[in-house]
Image: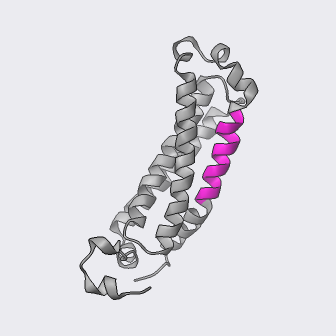
Amino acid sequence: PVGIGGWLSIAVVMIILRPIGTFWMHYATVLGALDAQHWSGLQSTVPAPWTDFAPFILLVIVAWGTILTVLHCVLVYLFFARRTSAPYLFIVLQWMNLFYVGLAWAVLVGFHLGAGTNAVRVVLQLLAGVASAGAMTLYFLRSKRVKATFVRRYWRYTSDPRILADPA
């Protein structure tokens, strides 16, 4: 089987929606908690062992969310260009996104910047994310369709004439 079909169509929906979802989660959750009011009172809000490191940790989370959003946009291009790197980037971004969501939630709650987030709901969402990322990882690593669909390598690093001659 070659082409985007079967279980790979689920990944298509995820890949198209993930940049929007990552941006929205990043904007609404992380950047929403870092308005001028919270930032100016950060030293008094954050528990004692973290007060000195809180601004740096929050800025790292903001940068990480921005980089994730950009990488999800790059993945859209690589996926539809059928590049060999797309499945691996997809897997890495699945796990990075899951870790980002968990870390951002833990930091916001730990720094008392979260607006009363339901911990049970977040943990269940993280567990569902682990199950989804695990299933998609297995699929992308073992699927014959994935191996047959993503065949276009970066031209400088290949000597296979079939790939070089394929204009599509």
Q: Is residue 134 magenta?
A: no
Can residue 139 be seen here? The reply is no
Question: Residue 72, relative to residue 95: is it above or below?
Answer: below
Name, please, the residue furthest toward the top.
Answer: 48
Q: Position of 39 compared to 58: left or right?
A: right
Q: Name the image quarter holding the N terminus.
A: bottom left
Closer to us: 159 or 80: 159
Q: Main secondary structure of the magenta part?
A: helix
x and y percentages locating residue 154 in the rendered image: 35, 71
Question: Residue 122, relative to residue 3: is it above or below?
Answer: above
Q: Quadrant of residue 82?
A: bottom left
x and y percentages locating residue 12 in the rendered image: 55, 69
Magenta stretch?
18-33
How many discs mark residues in the rendered view?
0
Q: Name the image quarter holding the C terminus.
A: bottom left
Which residue corresponds to the image point at 37% horizontal and 87% vertical from the top-left? 166
Closer to us: 138 or 166: 166
